[in-house]
Amino acid sequence: MKDTATGQTYGRSDTLAGRFSLRARVTDNLEWTGHVDYALTRGDGINLTQPDVATATPAQLAAFSARSTIPRSQLNGPSFDTIQRFDNPRLSDHQTGVTSDLKWDVADGYELRLIDGFHWWRSAQTDGDVVFTPLDLLNRHGSFASDSQSHELQLISPKDKLLGGKLQYVAGLYYFGESYGTTEVFDVGSQLCSFVYGVLRPPFIGPCQAAPALGATDGVFHQDAASYAAYAQADYKLTDALTLTLGGRYTHDHKTGTFNQTVTNPFVGAGVLRAPEHTALSFSDSRPNWRANLSWQINPDVMTFVSYSTGYKSGGFNNGGGATALTSASRTFLSETSDDVELGLKSTFFEHRLLLDADLYQTNLNNFQDRSFNGLAFIVRNAGNVRARGAEVEGVLRPIEHVSVDFGAAYLDSIFTANHDAPGLPACTGAAGSCPTVQDLTGHTTTFAPKWTTNLGLEYDTAPFEGGWTAQLRGSLNYSSKFFTTNDDNPQSIAGGQTLLGARATVVSPDSRWSFSLYGDNLTNQHYFTIKLPQTLDSLFGVRVPATGATLLRGFMGAPITFGGRVSAKF
């Protein structure tokens, strides 16, 4: 993206990645496979965010233009140009992983399998001004660190031997542990004090400017997590065509953590940006989960199934600061549970010229974990219960030699069955003449839940030419209907509704060792938002409308028209 004020461009990212794998047959019944991977990404880390002019009236845009110093003519989002202060933004992200997979054929077809993994992640990000204007207001420095390990021991039964070949099973023990930490440091810009207190309390401008600017707030979060599980799953052939699958898993999670927010500049402390806080955190939960599946192989080309399963996602802690200090209880969110029913079909027809899969489902979520932006920080809260049901169909058609058509369509009906304490719209105050700060969204649509998503692809593969070279030409269309992107079901937050066109051309060498590709995405250069959020510090820009709850929203842009090339070699 281009900064029209300076002429500089942003959005660069360079990644260096590698992977090494080794497989060894130690003995006739002992095999070991190891993997090592590493990835380093560097760049400016900028994802373009733009004010959505459709969410504001001319009066609101005029107020925002006056206070932000962005000319009204430049408020034309969604677009790929921006006027925003960037103070040497940079990103450095390191990821390293090591895995070990040991398989031991014990006796009589039984297998023991031990899978161990270790992963290290370090990421540091210095943002541009996080109020997203040309003003020198707030700069953020963030870092993330994670050291994790997992270990899984499996016992796998022999195939086609137990109970006359009717029974086979897998059972296992699992452990996951992680030490995770984040830091968030804000530097006060040269214009923040006059911007904030010029509106709120002018006598505070001088003392605010005299207080520390670098490291004005410092938030540090640390968490240690451990998860233990035992599971078993068995397949039993009731008949040659009918198979029953039963499974169970028991999981125990335990997490401890601390959140410490220090403020050296009290004028950006409580009530403004970050409130001092020192909170110790602890969370534990244990849950059983179950699965039952009945599949019927109607004939060699058609299989149908019906299944029921339950699920569990552990609770945890919010790791971000806010203008109001949280308690241990309000910083903790509970586990989310689910139950799911599915009816499906997997099939091939016309001598495998048509592959067709279809699915009907309903999923119920309890204590739904909803993550949203409250204007200053991202917060996860338990947003009641959700019912999501829908239908999906996908397939591949090969009408003639060398030509294939792949397609898919999904319909989703997702609503809150209980969400009585959802946040009100951003500008609601609860005072007389304004909307309430809490609303009941029971029966309303959930966020990020488009009614329809579809995809269509057309591919042509050539016959070998010039000694065995082959070529592939592909075009694709992807569509998503509109959906809410904020957890208050704010109609201003609706995104989606665009169709994206892509194309790719690939040439492969006769021995398949080399391939060369050219591709293009979003070929019609659609300008669209992927998610929208209230403008940071929106009350100080004069864009709030307390009578309706509306404010100016800004959004993160989807990628513009993109062209690229790829060269691959196998050796």
Image (spheres, grey):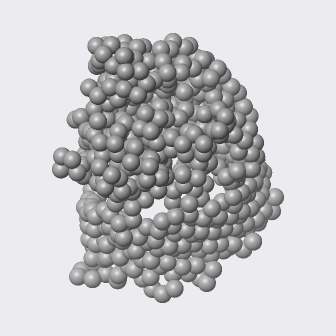
Residue 211 in picture, x, y percent from top left: 31, 13
- Above or below, 122 relative to 218: below
In front here: 478 or 285? 478
> Which residue extends farthest left?
7
In-image side of 101 versus 204 (left or right) = right
Quadrant of image for the C terminus: bottom left
Residue 247 in view here:
no
Q: How many marks?
A: 0
In-image side of 295 versus 273 (left or right) = right
In-image side of 349 versus 131 (left or right) = right
Residue 393 in view here:
yes
In front here: 540 or 299? 540
**Residue at point 35%, 69% (across, down):** 523
In front here: 250 or 12? 12
Residue 331 in picture, x, y percent from top left: 59, 23
**Residue at point 36%, 56% (across, down):** 76
**Residue at point 61%, 17% (across, down):** 328
Residue 85 in picture, x, y percent from top left: 27, 39
**Residue at point 49%, 78% (across, down):** 405
> Which residue extends farthest right?
238
In front here: 63 or 361? 63
- Above or below, 527 relative to 18: below
Residue 171 in picture, x, y percent from top left: 67, 39
> Which residue extends farthest bottom?
400
Q: Quadrant of residue 73?
A: bottom left
